[in-house]
């Protein structure tokens, strides 16, 4: 599956279950491990689990591979590894505390989009 198609599929799967604050971060210049990081919020353990499960189901149905899923037991932060894309589904306090957007900002410009729209091109290293 092409990266752009997988990205759209994941964003749609998160949006289907009312995921909030969906952001797509282009990490291709920062690491060779994956090309995109998608972060979304759910309001409860149950919703976080449902969001992660929906991503896994939609990717599998489309013929994609889910390499692993971590954190389902607790449901505060679930990581879904799709190979080229890493999906983080978190409750808002956890997302705020770890602030992955800033952590993965790096030194160069970072493209951040929300639900498929380009929001800004900014260096998150500026604080």
Image: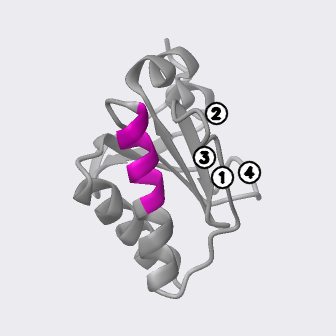
Which residue lies most toward the right here?
32
Helix, strand or loop at label 1? It is loop
- Say left or right for 108 vs 32: left
N-terminal label among 2 and 4: 4
For the magenta stretch, what is the residue range?
A: 45-53
Which mark is first along the chain, 2 or 1? 1
Residue mark closest to the camera, 2 vs 3: 3
| Residue visible at 45% across and 84% down in the picture | 61
Q: Gap in Å between the C-alphas at discs 1 and 2? A: 9 Å
Query: For the residues carrying marks 1 and 4, which lies nearer the camera in this image?
Result: 4
Which numbered disc flags the more N-terminal residue, 3 or 1?
A: 1
Could you classify mark 4 by the number of other residues whose Cα lies within 10 Å: few (under 14), some (14-19), or many (20 or more)? few
Determine the residue positioned at 61% across, 27% down: 103
- Mark 1 and 2 residues: CB-CB less than 8 Å, in contact? yes
Q: Main secondary structure of the magenta part?
A: helix
Residue 79's label in the rendered image is 3
Distance CA(mark 2)–CA(mark 3): 21 Å
**C-beta proximity under 8 Å, tags 2 and 4:** no
- Dot 2: few (<14), some (14–19), or many (≥20) neighbours within 10 Å? some
- Residue with the mark numbered 2: 106
Kindly identify which numbered label has been placed on residue 29.
1
Q: Earlier in the sequence, mark 3 or mark 4?
A: 4
* Residue 77 falls within the magenta-colored stretch: no
**Front-most of 63 and 102?**
63
């Amino acid at each position: 599956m092409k990266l752009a198609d997988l990205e759209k599929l994941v964003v749609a799967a998160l949006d289907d279950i009312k995921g909030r604050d969906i952001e797509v971060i282009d990490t291709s210049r920062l690491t060779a491990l994956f090309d995109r990081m998608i972060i979304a919020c759910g309001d409860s353990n149950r919703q976080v689990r449902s969001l992660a499960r929906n991503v896994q189901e939609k990717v599998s149905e489309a013929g994609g591979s889910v390499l692993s899923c971590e954190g389902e037991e607790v449901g505060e932060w679930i990581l879904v590894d799709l190979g080229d894309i890493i999906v983080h589904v978190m409750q808002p306090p956890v997302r705020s505390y770890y602030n992955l957007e800033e952590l993965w900002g790096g030194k160069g410009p970072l493209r951040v989009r929300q639900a498929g729209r380009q929001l800004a091109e900014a260096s998150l290293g500026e604080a």
